[in-house]
Image (spheres, grey):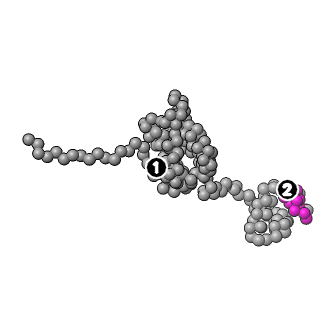
Amino acid sequence: MPMSDLVSGMPVAGDPRPRRQAETEACLRVAQHEGLDAEREVAKLYERGTVPPVKPEMQVIDEGAITARYAGQRYLASRTGASLDPIELDTLEHYRSLIEQTLLPCCDTKRITLIQDFENRDLCTRFTESWRQMRRKVGEVLAMSTRRTELQRFRTFLKFCVENGWMPRAALTVSKPGRRPPRRRRSVTGLS
């Protein structure tokens, strides 16, 4: 019997019931995986009337190839009202701005595709240094308080990526802006 008849779901000789294409493909995958002649094995299953049930296939994600775009979309989706950990709509819009208007355009211009590329501390630093005003004084450097807030949002996003196993913890070591070395205290002696 030609293989096309099996794959198309047409009944095998003597079997009045039509078969679903998914069942046939599942049988073929099992037979091929076990190194058997797929066509003969499927024909045997049809003759006996014992086609195994089709298990729903989960999408397998190669965690070593998670793109920045996918990670950003997953983060935003994970924080909407339908998720288990939703945030306020206004806050979600700030994250959307960081990801869609800052992170993804930066990735496009620098040809960064994988979220793992943000393991590199220098890349994270250059990314945060590139942040500019988008509304009032377009193109000017953000105020220090705004940079701190955006940096916290960026860290939260990176933490989400780490928790999902898409990058190691090393990426969270982005330095805080505006940190000054501690001042030396003068000792006061000899007061009269």
Nearest the camera: 165 or 4? Answer: 165
- Rendering coords of residue 1 (x, y %): 91, 65
Which residue is tagged 2? 9
- Compared with 84, 18 (above or below) is below
Observer-side mark, 1 or 2, equals 1
Residue at 81 percent across and 67 percent down: it is: 38
- SS category of the residue bearing label 1: loop
Residue at 11 percent across and 45 percent down: it is: 190
In the displayed structure image, the side of residue 183 where residue 168 appears, left or right: right
Give the extent of the magenta segment: 1-12
- Quarter of the image with the C terminus is top left
Q: Residues within 10 Å of mark 1 (few under 14, many from 20)?
A: many
Which residue is tagged 1? 174
Residue at 84 percent across and 63 percent down: it is: 46
Q: The disc labelled 1 sits on which kind of residue?
A: Val
In the displayed structure image, the side of residue 48 where residue 142 appears, left or right: left
In the displayed structure image, the side of residue 161 where residue 17 appears, left or right: right
- Rendering coords of residue 9 (x, y %): 85, 56
- Magenta stretch contains residue 21: no
Q: From mark 1 to mark 2, how far is it between C-alphas? A: 56 Å
The answer to which of marks 1 and 2 sits earlier in the sequence is 2
Q: Which mark, by number, is residue 133?
A: none
